[in-house]
Image (spheres, rainbow, N blue to C red):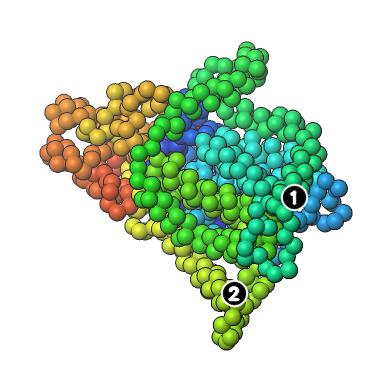
Amino acid sequence: MLALTALALLLRLVALGDRTMHWDEARVAYWTLRSVRGAGVAYRPIIHGPFLPIVVGALFERLGPTAFAARLPVAVVGGLAPLSALLFRRPAASSTTAAGSARFGLSDEETVALAALLAVTPSLVYYSRFMRSDVPLAVFALFALGFAVRALATGRRRHVVAAGLFVGLAVPTKENVLLYAACAGGAAAVAVGWPAVAPLLPWREEGDPRPAASAALRDSLARARRVAAHHLPAVPLALLVALVPVVFFLAPRGPAGDPNLGMALAGDAGWLALIERATVGTWETFRSSLWTGSRSHSYPEYAGKLWGYVLVGALPVAVGAGAAFVRELRSPSRPLVVPLVAWGVASLLGYPLATDIPAPWLSIHLVVPLLVPAAVGCVALVRERAWEFEVDPPDADARRRYARYALAALVVLSAVQVPLVLAATSITPPLYVNVLAQTAQPPEDLSPMRETVADAADDGGVLFYGEEYHLPDERVADRPPAEGENWLGWWLNRLPMAWYAERASAPTAHVGDAESLRETEPIPPVVFADPSEAESAAAVLEPRGYERTRYELGLYHEQAVVVFVDASRLDRRGTDRSVHSPPMVGVRRA
């Protein structure tokens, strides 16, 4: 287990800062750095929960504002995910109380298989190397589920409290924690109701007892009541423990809110008011956000893309979960398989409806509930030696062997596919066609642009040219937009350049047309222009000695920027860029 965890960390940490920042990474990193420099932190739906901004902000203060520091918390959380497999392991008889049932645990082989899937599944690896909240949400939810399963397997209430802690950590990561809660409730209902459905299946193996469905349902409900009654005394403490990270991360900090966490710690605000702000206030902010609006997109198109990402980025998980489910239909024996497959199917069907874009990182949330069934299914295929079969006779047993052979072939295909996808996404430099990358991922190295902006920081900074980059005021982007503010679309067009400017503490300015550019004196040494407006800027800048360079900002040539640079002014500053390392507190741009 430790070896798999070490492998997972290695895959996530090596060359972590090499890939150019995705637009979404640059957006969140920008406002994280602004919060460190005095803008404060408050829940803003546009950047999801404040868990990452707060943790990454602390790293920016100590390690500097780099891509490595921005991605480090996600990489560590994702790298430690294989340890959660131990929570699903079948407990020893001596550690199980009368209220527990070892039926809920995995065998040693299945536990190792689960850890291996968490360590090397390509989509989990790629987005563990990415500054987004999806992996922290998924891993915290998996740990919470693991502790809940541990409580069922051992009957020990302390695991309920531990599950509460990880639920509390999941809440401030991302809004679709609500979907996790709904799916978990549905999975629990399936777990209670499945024993009543299983006896009715017509393809059950011969000789299996077939109790009446009503009797099976009564027995299942009685077991559920006993389990609930046993663990109920631990629930209030679990809720209290969950409240601690919720308030710690969701309470405003600095000038971003009143009351805020600093005021409460100093005794200038009441803790009840702060808790209300962190809970009720956060809920009301979420309710009025764009994430709760209606969706008007093609369901088949979104579903096809998301399901395709699952097959490309987590093929062994899909194959193993399918094998476990088919096996459970024939001979029910593993209580976790059907409820978690039901959770996965609900996610597969629901996310294409709920999401606003069919982004590949969403496939993480479709894969996570299938991981435990996948471990069961993969080990079952190996144990049954599905690759051994007889051609004759073509009876029922032979047909079952053929089916197992087909599944085994898929497992072998998966074993070949995983390293290929890892190599094409997380290990090699970014390509124009990256099967797991979203289109706002710059396909080329932008370090020359970053260094140019750093050189310009103390000599006028950078200028954004044209209507594509318009802002009503340069200072408006000091914090994420509140509800009703409509400047975000223009500011997003400035990414990832705005992140490089903030990282270097470079002043920013904007002009809308060539006439305004001519009247600007002095013109900053670095000017960004959208390709559609580059020629009008060139008519002013190139006679003054500026040279232009085009950078691709998105896969498939969908976004680009033209950068005009007065190299003579930057060359006079020398080549030592260490002077541009910005102070971390109290910096304000002109």
Instruction: Write the residue at 33% across / 45% down.
Output: 449
Q: Nearer the viewer, residue 393 or 403?
A: 393
User: Which corner quadrant holds the N terminus?
Assistant: bottom right
Distance Cα–Cα, label 1 vs label 2 = 31 Å
Instruction: Write the residue at 71% across / 49% down.
Output: 214
Instruction: Write the residue at 14% across / 38% down.
Output: 536
Give amino acid for label 1: Ala
Secondary structure of the residue carrying tag 2 is: helix
Secondary structure of the residue carrying tag 1 is: helix
Location of mark 2 (residue): 400
Q: Residue 232: x percent and y percent?
A: 77, 35
Q: Which mark is residue 283?
A: none
Q: Which mark is residue 215?
A: 1
Q: Nearer the viewer, residue 10 or 294?
A: 294
Lower sequence index among marks 1 and 2 = 1
- From the viewer's perspective, tell me whether residue 238 is left or right of residue 426: right
Q: Nearer the viewer, residue 196 or 326?
A: 196
Q: Nearer the viewer, residue 280 or 544?
A: 280
User: Which corner quadrant holds the C terminus?
Assistant: top left
Q: Residue 95: x percent and y percent?
A: 84, 51
Mark in the foreground, 1 or 2: 1
Give amino acid for label 2: Arg
- From the viewer's perspective, tell me whether residue 380 is left or right of residue 157: left
Q: Quadrant of residue 258?
A: top right
